[in-house]
């Protein structure tokens, strides 16, 4: 079971530790826009925090259940875009999710990881509505080829590309003496090299991220079925410092493939459509890697 736990918590599929906090900043960048005039630019600042409970042994040596909660806020602002309903185009986008993970060891080689992630996603201007709610999740089967390599595959339903949709998942993990790779396509590729024993790491990270947010009307005559679709790809070098279970990671890289659309869910044509120019971005994150729960008992 310990091997399963190591795979679970190091897996790119889970993408979180017992605790994580991150800050991501992208300076204003030019925008190619539809349905607006002027000379628009866009800026995004994002915060993210997540917490997981210690694993619960549902079936001793066979199945674990892990619960968690995540909160994120993205401040988006479109400057000098004539035609937006909001004069400065500023919207705060919130995401609050309940994260439920189930990990099962089928035998010495095969394991199964599934997640059910209900959440609310919107600007939360005037309370909650049914259109703020979104259910996401995935299931991933992994086979351990040897002590260093594992392969996996599965599927999910998520707003990774800014639209809730089914996704096929492919996983590859490699754990060498100093080099490691965590890959979960189409989400992320993380490559790390251990420079100083269990202390300093350098790497390359690429990630696709997205969101689908309900925008509640700020005025009574505005429609209530308006959503923001946001997606972005990032790539760049990273530096990580480990202090035992605590890891501090800094990343500076290139941000591209950014789309920011404002849509009505009964209209196939976006109300406003923005394709953001590539730009540099910087992020810093703090995570706590969980210890193996040798003493955790079923509850």
Image: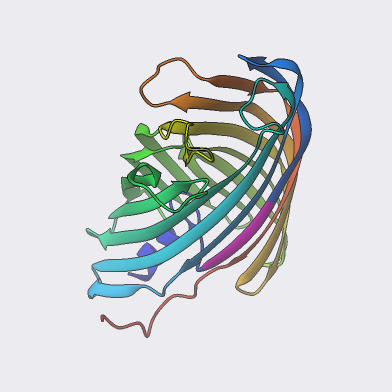
Q: Percent position (x, y) of residue 42?
A: 72, 31
Give the dominant element type of the magenta stretch: helix, strand or loop. Answer: strand
Which residue is outermost to the front? 220
Scheme by which the image is coloured: rainbow
Classify residue 241 as left or right of residue 180. Answer: right
User: Which one is nearer the viewer's eye here, 277 or 297?
Assistant: 277
Q: Residue at x 64, y 25 (%)?
A: 84
User: Which one is nearer the viewer's eye here, 244 or 67?
Assistant: 67
**Residue 6 shows up from this direction:** no
Q: Is residue 161 magenta?
A: no
Classify residue 195 as left or right of residue 163. Answer: right
Q: Is residue 21 magenta?
A: yes
| Range of residues picked out in magenta | 19-23
Q: Quadrant of the C terminus?
A: bottom left
Q: Percent position (x, y) of residue 66?
A: 35, 67
User: Which one is nearer the viewer's eye here, 163 or 247?
Assistant: 163
Q: Residue at x 34, y 52 (%)?
A: 118
């Amino acid at each position: 079971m310990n091997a399963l736990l190591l795979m679970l918590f190091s897996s790119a599929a889970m993408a979180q530790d017992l605790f994580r906090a991150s800050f991501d900043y992208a300076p204003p960048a030019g925008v190619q826009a539809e349905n607006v005039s002027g000379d628009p630019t866009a800026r995004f600042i994002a915060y993210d925090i997540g917490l997981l409970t210690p694993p619960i042994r549902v079936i001793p040596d066979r199945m674990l259940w892990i619960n968690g909660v995540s909160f994120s806020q993205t401040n988006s602002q479109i400057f000098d875009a004539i035609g937006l309903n909001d004069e400065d185009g500023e919207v705060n986008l919130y995401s609050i999710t309940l994260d439920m993970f189930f990990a099962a060891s089928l035998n010495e080689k095969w394991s199964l990881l599934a997640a059910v992630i209900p959440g609310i996603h919107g600007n939360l201007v005037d309370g909650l509505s049914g259109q703020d709610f979104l259910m996401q999740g995935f299931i991933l089967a992994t086979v351990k080829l040897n002590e260093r390599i594992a392969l996996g595959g599965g599927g999910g339903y998520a707003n990774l590309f800014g639209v809730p949709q089914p996704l096929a998942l492919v996983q590859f993990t490699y754990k060498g003496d100093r080099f490691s790779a965590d890959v979960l396509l189409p989400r992320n590729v993380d490559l790390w090299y251990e420079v100083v024993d269990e202390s300093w790491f350098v790497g390359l990270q690429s990630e696709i991220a997205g969101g689908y947010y309900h925008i509640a009307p700020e005025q009574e005559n505005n429609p209530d079925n308006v959503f923001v679709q946001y997606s972005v790809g990032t790539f760049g070098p990273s530096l990580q410092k480990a202090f035992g279970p605590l890891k501090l990671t800094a990343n500076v890289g290139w941000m591209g493939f950014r789309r920011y659309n404002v849509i009505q869910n009964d209209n196939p044509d976006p109300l406003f459509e923005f394709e953001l120019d590539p730009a540099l971005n910087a992020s810093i994150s703090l995570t706590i890697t969980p210890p193996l729960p040798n003493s955790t008992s079923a509850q």
